[in-house]
Amino acid sequence: MTRSRPELERALAEDPFDLATRKEYARALEDDGQAAAALRQWELVCRQQPDSAAGFLGAMRCHRALGALERAEACLREAEAKQDFSPEIRPARPAPALQVLTGGGDVRPAAVVPLRPAAVRFDDVIGHAALKKTLEVRIIAPFVRPGLFARFGKRAGGGVLLYGPPGCGKTMIARAIASECRASFIAVGISEILDMWLGRSERNLAAAFDRAREQRPAVLFFDELDALAFSRSKAHTDHTRTLVNEFLNQLDGVAHDNQGVLVLGATNMPWDVDPAMKRPGRFDRQVFVPPPDDDARAEMFRVKLADAPTGPIDVLRVARATPHCSGADVDGVIEAAKERVLTEILAGGPERPIAESDLLAAAKEVQPSTLEWLRTARNLVKYAGDGSYRDVEDYLKSARLL
Amino acid sequence: MSELHGLQHQIGRLLEVRRPHDARALVGEALALDPADPDTLCLAGRVELAQQQRAEAERRAHEALARAPGHDGARSLLFDILLADKRHAEAEAVVLERLRDDPADPVALTDYARLLLHVFQLDKARALVAEALRCAPDDAAAQVLDAVLHVIQGDDRAAADRLARLVAADPEAAHVAWTAMLVLSERGHPRQALEIGRQLLRTSPDNPRLVDAVIELRLASHWSMLPLWPILRGGWVASAVLWAVAVFGLILLRPFVHEVVLLVLALLYLALLLYSYVGPPLLRRWLRWRGF
């Protein structure tokens, strides 16, 4: 049985030398696309089991995912030197994705360029129609048509903070903004910045900004911004304060020119972000990403059930039975419905597709993960008198949570 | 700095920015490097405590103490767990052990004072905080506790003095704002305390105690509570005085004023009593439901 990540972490804390669990954990991280974190785990496997090829092969895959091809090659050579290495498990070397640009009439060798990974467009983001419109006008248009905006005294770039409950598509929207801006997209997570060595976190942060400036027009995206710019009034150590100071220094651009660099941040806990980060010239535009509405959830159910065997389903009815659910919760409902059907079939029942009743029953079992966030945000709106959460207030009123 | 120390530093940082889940992954790595390191075990306990896994946190603390019996971090962790579990006698044993090793440890003295505050041994708590401040005059935790104790004992002036020193040292710190809110509230400035409370709530909206405190402050500063100002300000002492003044006042006034006037005064007094009993809970419910 596959264990969840928290279960694996708990098991590893119990017995750090359980190699099978560590490998499973590393694979889970790889599957989640967290190559840097997975690499650390594979490196530990290598250290604990230096005569086995498995750890080196895992590290090789992670290096490849991180674009460190030379290190990947070195790991492969290490793996090949181990006794348990067999040629069958040798991974295929990554073939560069090819695109034929010219050809046909003129007999010339075709020019080949590596393809960029499929970009997420705004059309791929289900729902959030009003939000997309706002982002189009406030963020994308100044980037795409800088001349027009310059005539009105507005500059492209700056900082935008996307906030809202978890699982509602903040990261996907950030990616879509980058592709709509036709800009390079540099995504930075806390594992890429926070470093165990003193002073290196600040250097990592500066390097991310430098990279964005080199590749301008660029969108520099900080996921989990609250962890990188944690409120200094709540911090107990100087390390956190130093990192926030460096962040402010990079954003202010006194020594740097951030023209053409759009800095995006995403957070579930905007109240943990240092207030100085939200001042003009920094993350001065704060955009609330609400949970999807009924129509958006209906569309999600339609898209996500497309590949599964289903009977006739009124997706709008199912969507209405899942109020406040995020995209991740919708996945949870579908998975629970699938499990119900499979359990019935395995218990000797007839093989049948997923029915609407399965989804409605599953919807009752799934607690929306956004509720806790919305309750916390309600405290801000109701008691703290914080005018910067006007969008949240409107949403809570429309959802009858206020 | 070794790799292990680096990982420990990183775990501490992740705990500070409220990422216990990420910290847990690093704990596994640190334990893989040295499963017997008491600092790592102690951090593992802190991670568990941050995720409200108190039993597991306690097990980690004992594990660390088994390897390093005098480990300060582990004893401090164990103390925090026991205090959170309201196991006061066991917590006292732990903190006494720390004080036996170092009688001038300001952290242990403050922890002991905190414990005594929990069990309302205010005089002993005051003496311990005074000792902690003698050993470390700039210790913020001791200063906050000192101000809190002054407030509880009704010495608002001394509390305000302590607050002034805290503000001078670190005006933006959250603990200073908390203390300021408490002191202002006790000195009869609920409106100003409310403003600070609301500022605090903007940074910690997930703190239910803070939400309750802000609602109480709004209640105390609401115009409809003006007739109850003496009772709200003076508590049960003011209630007793008001009751005595009303009863004896009416008796003394009896020979001089008309009976109708006396009846009106008595009814007014009864209305005030009824209002003091019914008004605040109703307003509290209204404020909680409606917001402000």
Image: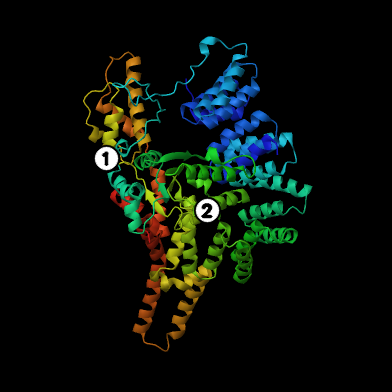
Which numbered disc, 2 or 1, marks the residue closer to the eye?
2
Label 1: few (<14), some (14–19) or many (≥20) C-alpha neighbours in 10 Å = many
Q: Is residue A247 left or right of residue B126?
A: left
Relative vertical location of residue B271 with respect to residue A174 in this rendering, above or below:
below
Chain of the residue on which disc 2 is drawn: A
The quadrant in which residue A200 appears is: top right
Q: Is residue A224 visible?
A: no
The quadrant in which residue B70 appears is: top right
Q: Is residue A92 left or right of residue B84?
A: left
For label 2, the SS is helix
For label 1, the SS is helix
Q: Is residue A344 visible?
A: yes
Q: Label 2 sits on what residue type?
A: Leu
User: Who is closer to the viewer here, A43 or B76?
Assistant: A43
- Residue B20: where, in percent of width, then height? 55, 40
Q: Label 1 sits on what residue type?
A: Asp
User: Who is closer to the viewer here, B237 or A164?
Assistant: A164
Chain of the residue on which disc 1 is drawn: A
User: Which residue is at a point 52% across and 40% down the rendered structure image?
Assistant: A190
Residue at mark 1: A294
Point out the tag, 2 or 1, that comes first from the N-terminus. 2
- Distance, label 2 to label 1, CA atoms, is 39 Å
Residue at mark 2: A248
